[in-house]
Amino acid sequence: MSKDEEKPVIYGSDSIVSLEDIEHIQLRPSMYIGEIYEPGLYKLDSEPILNSVDEYLNGFGTQILITLDTHKNIMVIRDFGRGIPVEKLVEVFTKTNTGGKFNNNSYSRRIGANGVGLKALTALSDFLEVEVYQEAVPEAKIPAKYGKAEFVDGKLASYDWKELPNGIPSDKHRGTKISYISSEKYLKTRTHDIPKLCDYMDTMAYQNSGLEFVFTIDGKTKRFLHTGGIQEHFANFTKKRKLKIMFEPILVSGEEEMFDYEIVFSYSPNSSAGDRNIVSHCNGNSTPEHGYHVSAMRAGAALALTQYINTAGNIPKSAEKMKLSGTLIGNNLVAIVGIGHENPLFDGQTKDSLKSQDVTEPIKQGVRAQMTKWLNDNPQKAKKLVDLVITFAKYNEEIKKLRSNIVDAKATRSVFEAGSIDPEKYTTCRSNDPEEKELFIVEGKSAGGGVAMATDRNFQAIYRLTGKILNVYGKNKAIIDNQVLKDIVQILGMGWPDPTKANQTNYKNLKFNKIIILTDADDDGFHIRILLLTFFYCFYPDIILNGHVYVANPPIKRLTMNNGQYFYISTDKHYDEYMKELILHSFTLHSKKNDVQLSKKLFGVFIDAVSGYQVLIDNHAAATALKPDLLEHIVMNIDTVLKSTDDPSNSINKEFYKRSGYMITRHKNNNIITFDRGIYHASLKYDKTFVDEHFTPILEKLNDIHIYGVYLKGIRSGHDYRGTIYDLCKTMNGILGPKIKVTRFKGLGEMERKDLKETVINPETREWTLITMEDADRAEKALEVFMGSDNNKLKQLFYAGEIDGV
């Protein structure tokens, strides 16, 4: 027996350890920075920058210097704030829930609040050095101070601080300087997301008027400084995205006891991008998932417009019976929403969404009052808004009625008389009104057949993809020779673009208001989507800019109840979230030790941690020809298994029987272990193959779970569900029971007509994603990188100065 075989990894009581803060961050980095790889490193890089911004928010320092040496992987961030108190340097960088942000007297405005960011930076850096110069406070008889600490792999290597009776040396400045080398061991990368950091600093400069970010990468410097505040941000944002605005933006501001806010917004007549045209932040930090400040702004604007419509009295008779509401054009909002809060609540360490409910009512009523005043003071502009609402309402009414139109025989014949489109590929529709016509571009013949049965022939046409789609990026439009693309060009009716003419495409001849890409939700389907979107972008960009291109989102599952009711699941993540909520509403989690009910939050952590565990055990059990519960007992009691003997009456053997219910016999001569329970008999050869291929993967998953000694209690039944982790997983995953049938769709071809109709065809129930070109320059750069042939193009463009934070 080899040394590996004699000394396997043991999982027993000795494996349960208490970790220091830094050790826990290193073991579970995703709990602190969201995820690892480039997104995690980006989050890590932003943490010390946020601390420097907090100093500015409280009146100290107007410049932040960020320097990155990509060759040595060294990042240096320096501010000119007050400097971290030198006596507490080590605690601030190593002890969670320690920091000045918990003291409102020190920070009346702050982005950071959890006392975690700098600890994560320490833990996930191979090397970190912090230097601090603090100015003297004469009135308190406090001298100037200097402090320095160094950390290697999260552990303190050196630390010292001293008073400076003669003040800070003339060649130094007050503030904090942090230098670090991020750890590839923990983050699995050393590639800093330079474009995203540039974009981040640019946005932060808008949101913190007067604060300058100086970013130097390998000697090349970029500066981000904006002094025009939220209105300048709005102007540049709309210009960058090429958004047409209906009127000069409305400015709303207010001040409450715990927070103040500033909002600027308008409407875009041609864009219906939802929250993608809204930028939000709290205390200067971007909140990309928005939160209560944005939902309150949207609600206030909708209420004001709805009230104005109901009281204006100038609604055309044709629209009097329509359901007119400001929410109809809510997705046309373009806005910058900023808030400063003394004690903000976020959805987690990543701070992507604001969860401070106290902002809701004041912002909603503030926006409502200001917009009501604007509507009354600007009747002509208000009429344009009302007309836009009526247009949307009318469109919705027309879609619901699905009016029938006479077949335009002449137009239909002309399609096929050209001799290039196979009628088996293309099914036209009866309507000759481009405003209501929809074209589905469907993957495959079988899927196309099902879609054909589900569509409404009055206004929905189908083109079935049966050939290869060409990647047209960088290709000469005049020499493209691909039958699929030629078919699509002819069906759309705009003509083949002529690069020799100024007006190469006649968009007025577009025969369909909506073009829907409908493919399977797999790699091939996504590839087809990308190729088609590349074609539309390169050949007909205006149909994307004007909101004509969509991607359908077919479900992956249908859940059918015992009473016949059913609903759809769009993604695996959606299904996991649904199951998690169902489990949380069906059980409570309790400690075996003292029967105390654990918090719902901890229960949620447990559910996430055990995700996939049952499947893992089942797969390894099948491979080892062992029962799943037996395999789990072997792994969890490996020390007992390896100490067992060939005597069933041995105390160790009895101990395993007590824990598992299986009689165990270990035959040391051939390293075979047998297990018996009733008529069940199984054998296991304990060797390096078993350890490497089965034991270790299960053990790693068990270590990830890190919550043991618990049981479930049914909320309605009051019944206790006890057992191993595998048993608890079976209980939770079986919550749907036999009364709910789960149907998984592997592709469009396997979906029934009613499923297709409800999820991707019927205007009242379908789920589509509108394809938008939020930034034409950014889209062009992305296509050049991902669809072109030069994978290093993005980096080359950045260093050449041709792009700025793309």
Image (tube, rainbow, N blue to C red):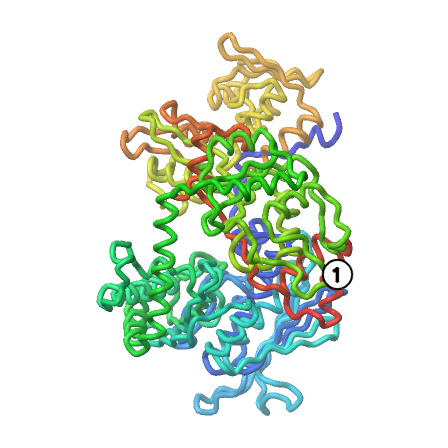
Screen quadrant of the C terminus: bottom right
Residue type for callout 1: Lys
The percent coordinates of residue 738 (x first, y second) are: 38, 23
Picture quarter containing residue 315? bottom left
Instruction: Please state which of residues 117 and 279 is positioned toward the viewer in this rendering.
Output: 279
Would residue 186 be visible to someone looking at this image? no
Residue at label 1?
Answer: 793
Instruction: Please state which of residues 589 and 425 is positioned toward the viewer in this rendering.
Output: 425
Q: Secondary structure at mark 1?
A: helix
Tell me if 69 is positioned left or right of 673 in this view. Answer: right
Is the residue 523 above or below the residue 480 in the image?
A: above
Would residue 416 be visible to someone looking at this image? yes
Instruction: Please state which of residues 689 and 791 is positioned toward the viewer in this rendering.
Output: 791
Screen quadrant of the N terminus: top right
Picture quarter containing residue 221? bottom right
Seen at 45% across and 57% down, the residue is 348
The percent coordinates of residue 665 (x first, y second) are: 59, 15
The percent coordinates of residue 165 (x first, y second) are: 57, 89
